Amino acid sequence: MKHAHTQSPGTQDPGTRIGKARRRRARARGQGGFTLVEMLVVITIIGLIMSLVGPRVLNYLGESKVKAAKIQIQSFSSALDLFYLDAGRYPSTAEGLTALVKPASGLTAWNGPYLKGGAVPNDPWGKPYLYRAPGERSAYEILSYGADGQEGGTGTAADISTASNE
């Protein structure tokens, strides 16, 4: 009676390994890459989708900057109210919003800084906010000229002020 040859689980017959390698190479030859035409079609489809979606995304970005400016102006208004409670007055136009982070000369009741960060931030378009005291309709006015940086305008280029936030 002949005994069947048994192998331990970790060993293989060398002929079996060669056979598996040949089968793997044969499968790999059958799986080609994408053709140039297929890649051009996919790129064209992605381009069409971006041309439809892109303008909407850019519009939302512009609107979010306007909202950020309005929120910053509200934050300045709160800080100015705290300044008023401490000093009994709002900063003058000459002192500006800087009086919220650095004490104005001759002011003894300053308990600031009233804004975090130690500096007055610029508007979302990188330009400084304008501050007037007294304002046209209230004790003060904070103003950003919007995306175009010029007085007037419409849409994202419109002026944003404490008067427009009310």
Image: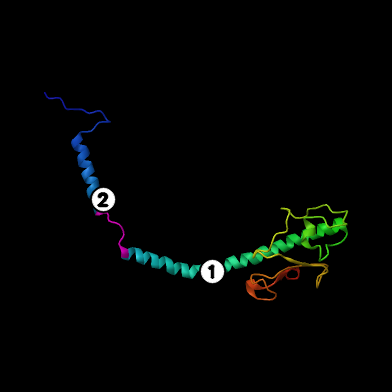
Quadrant (top left/top right/bottom left/bottom right) for the C terminus: bottom right
Residue 20 x, y percent position in the rendering? 22, 42
Name which residue type carries label 1. Answer: Arg
Q: Farthest residue in the front direction? A: 105
Residue 52 x, y percent position in the rendering? 48, 70
Residue 25 x, y percent position in the rendering? 23, 47
Q: Secondary structure at mark 2?
A: helix
Mark pair 2, 1: CA separation: 43 Å
Q: Farthest residue in the top direction? A: 1
State the residue at coordinates (81%, 60%): 81
Q: Is residue 161 magenta?
A: no
Residue nearest the observer in this picture, 123 or 165: 123
State the residue at coordinates (79%, 63%): 96
Location of residue 4 by image quarter: top left
Q: Secondary structure at mark 1?
A: helix
The magenta stretch spans which residues? 30-36
Q: Earlier in the sequence, mark 2 or mark 1?
A: 2
Location of residue 150 by image quarter: bottom right
Majority secondary structure of magenta residues: loop
**In the image, is 2 to the left or to the right of 165?**
left
**In the image, is 86 to the left or to the right of 61?**
right
Q: Farthest residue in the left direction? A: 1
Quadrant (top left/top right/bottom left/bottom right) for the N terminus: top left
Give the number of the disc on residue 56.
1
**In the image, is 79 to the left or to the right of 89?**
left
**Residue under pointer 2:** 28
State the residue at coordinates (30%, 57%): 33
Name which residue type carries label 2. Answer: Ala
